[in-house]
Image (cartoon, rainbow, N blue to C red):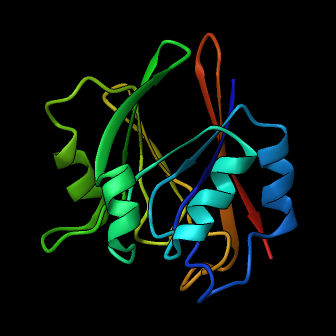
Amino acid sequence: MKITVIADTHIPKRAKWLPEIVFQSIESSDLVIHAGDFTAYEVLIDLQSLKPLEGVAGNNDGPEILMQLGKKKIVQYAGFYIGIIHGDGAYGTTIQRVKQAFAKDKVDIVIFGHSHQAYQEWDQGVLYFNPGSPTDKRLSPKYSFGEIWLGEKIEPKIHYFL
């Protein structure tokens, strides 16, 4: 199973739509996971029309997205438990908040966003994965998104592009 992972798209403020490289990944994926900050409800609807989508609301998303997706969830695909959260909050770093949010949950992967910084780390058997942003790189040298393959094991990859 192939999953395309995106976050912090901030459409239409940062871009009119997703870059072609992201669409190519989505076309060959079984699932899209968006870790929040769609910023426009139409983006959620459009992505749902392409592939099955799991996601959460970010701190820049409106009430329609929040009511439909919530702020935190755990889903199961291909025998793996995947936690999804945006990662915003008042205390600590993004990764500290994310780890705390799932500290008592059984998860194999935690997907998050908020920082616009791509991040991939295994910690105590859990993959913490932030795809960065395909439309707003902030302090990152390149835009990015992620792909995760679920089979006998978890195989993550972050793709960087200009």
Query: Residue 82 versus residue 154: which sits nearer the camera?
Result: 82
Query: Residue 118 versus residue 86: which sits nearer the camera?
Result: 86
Q: Residue at x 16, y 68 (%)?
A: 92
Number of marks drawn: 0
Left or right: 44, with 160 as reference point: left
* Quadrant assignment, res 29: top right
Find the residue positioned furthest to the bottom: 13
17 is higher (above) or lower (below) than 126: below
Residue 74 screen position, x and y as percent: 34, 33
Specify the quadrant that holds the N terminus. Answer: top right
131 is higher (above) or lower (below) than 102: below
Left or right: 12, with 54 as reference point: right
Left or right: 60, with 139 as reference point: left
Query: Residue 74 versus residue 53: which sits nearer the camera?
Result: 53
Q: Residue at x 80, y 70 (%)?
A: 19
Residue 47 screen position, x and y as percent: 66, 55
Q: Residue at x 65, y 15 (%)?
A: 151
Specify the quadrant that holds the C terminus. Answer: bottom right
* Quadrant assignment, res 133: bottom right
Q: Residue at x 19, y 47 (%)?
A: 101
Residue 76 screen position, x and y as percent: 44, 22
* Quadrant assignment, res 32: top right
19 is higher (above) or lower (below) than 55: below
